[in-house]
Amino acid sequence: MLIKSIKLIESIIPLQKICSRDDHFCKQTSFDLAKNIKIFHEEGKIYFAEKKKLQEKYCNKDSKNNIITDESGNMTFEKETLDALNIDFAQLNSVDIDVNIKKIRLSKLPVGVAPIDIAAIDFMLIEDLTE
């Protein structure tokens, strides 16, 4: 399944919240959720490494090419470079990632999962058909 990188990143925390609930899932659902989390974490490592490269490319550096940080330890940027950085971030966020995720039946999620969390993982849910 192709998914935009930002959608994958934004779904990690809601997916972890759902899995950390005290509700008991059937074994298959539990396995599929755990497998998806593992896949998302691996893809997330790549995403954040690429994001860091972009930040390091555009951040302020001293004469020895060392990164300049503020008093909180955050990288600093010139206003002129922020537009280019934001364009590169937008491109990174729109990268299509081919992931082999497991689909989860909506009815297999515990009652009481927040609608915002369901919306965050909607691409991996299968609606149960009722007749």
Image (spheres, helix red, strand yellow):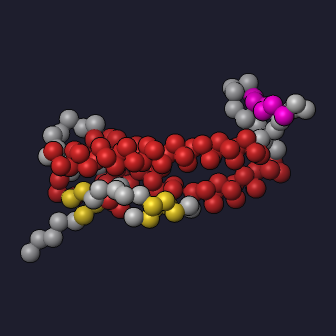
Q: Position of residue 122 (x, y in %)?
A: 34, 60
Q: Quadrant of the N terminus?
A: bottom left
Q: Residue at x 63, y 59 (%)?
A: 90
Is residue 44 inside the magenta stretch? no
Instruction: State whether residue 5 is above or below residue 53.
Output: below
Relative to 99, does residue 25 appear above or below in the rendering?
Answer: above
Residue 12's place in the image compared with 62, above or below, is below
Q: Residue furthest left?
A: 131
Which region is colored magenta? Answer: 65-70
91 displayed left or right of 8: right
Q: In what quadrant of the picture does the C terminus appear?
A: bottom left
The overriding secondary structure of the stretch rendered in magenta is loop
Q: Is 39 on the left or on the right of 52, as rendered?
A: left
Image spot of residue 55 (x, y percent): 70, 43
Q: Residue at x 73, y 41 (%)?
A: 56
**Front-most of 63 and 83?**
63
Residue 113 in sight: no
